[in-house]
Amino acid sequence: MAPKRSKKTILDCSKNLTIGAQSATFKVQFVVDSTFGVPGAITVVNRYEKELFLESVIIEGLVRFSCNSWVQPENTIAHKRIFFSDKPYLPWETPAGLKELREEELRQLSGNGKGLRVYSDRIYDYDMYNDLGNPDKGIEYARPTLGGEKNPHPRRCRTGRPPTNTDILAESTVQEPMQIYVPRDDAMERCKKEDFEVGRQKGMRRNFVPYLASIADRDAFERFSDINGLYKKRSSLEMKSPLAKIVEKVQDYIEPYKFDPPMTISMDASCCLRDDEFGRQALAGINPLSVERLKV
């Protein structure tokens, strides 16, 4: 009942590859016996120097393998990557030939709880929060450990960093240029990191103007129109203090970084003044369990 395998097929990705293209599609042929049956898994080895993102493998008219994963070079990670077909199985219905591969994939994802995690790993093992402080800088920087055997939550991805010099039970913090370990397939790509950074800058710049406004005029937000003014093309704050011109220049600078108006305000700026809108927001709040039936 061991897995039945076809012959190996080599794909040369350098052929017919358009430089700068977002993705590419290639055709390969597998040689199988007529009694092979429906494929349930496929193993992949990357013999290039760089990692490759494998989106999917489709055996035309028969089965699809949705991969959506980074395949590391063979000299980085020696074991083969295993991808399973899109057909789901209950545990007791899994074909015997796939059980061995399922167990192997689980071992690869679970790890052995040892060693330092690196950028190319895709291991999901967990650890307690013992890296919140930095006791090497002083006793005032020490922090308690969260989680453990008695209280397993919260927990974090295990990184395997060495302990601190002061406390062997505390893991050392992340130092530049080292990054916090995230399994490769869950790490943010470059474009998403850039969007995240732009969002962070938006938040900083957006909060900077109200901060200056609060210094320049303690009564800057007396009306709803003052709050709505933060989302318009130009702020409608009326400040007569010496800092008004500075705030105005800052607003011109941060205009490209402003957040878009909330959907409700963009459709109707006075919606929050009506009782029905206030009730709708209360019922659609972040904690619907707090809504109770009116008894009296």
Image (cartoon, rainbow, N blue to C red):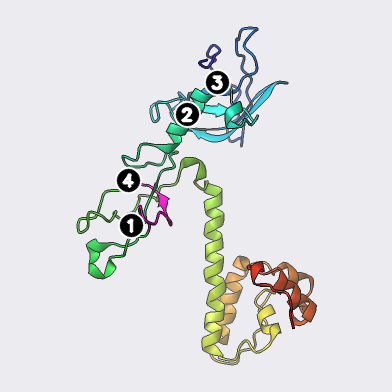
Mark 1 vs mark 2, CA separation in Å: 32 Å
Residue labelled with disc 1 = 131
* Mark 4 vs 3, N-terminal side: 3
Residue labelled with disc 3 = 96
Mark 1 vs mark 3, CA separation in Å: 43 Å
Q: Residue furthest left?
A: 166
127 and 32: which is toward the camera: 127
Span highlighted in magenta in the image: 147-159
Three-letter code, disc 1 = Asp
Q: How many neighbours does mark 2 have within 10 angstroms: few (below 14), some (14-19), or many (20 or more)?
A: few
Residue labelled with disc 2 = 103
Task: Look at the numbered disc 2 and give the secondary structure of its residue.
Answer: helix
Task: Look at the numbered disc 1 and give the secondary structure of its residue.
Answer: loop
**Mark seen at residue 160:** 4
Residue located at (44% from left, 46% from top): 182
- Residue 151 is inside the magenta segment: yes
Q: Is residue 125 left or right of residue 6?
A: left
* Mark 1 vs 3, N-terminal side: 3
Prevailing secondary structure class for the magenta stretch in the rendered image: loop
Q: Is residue 146 above or below residue 140?
A: above
Task: Note whether residue 138 is visible.
Answer: yes
- Residues marked 1 and 4 touching at CB (< 8 Å): no
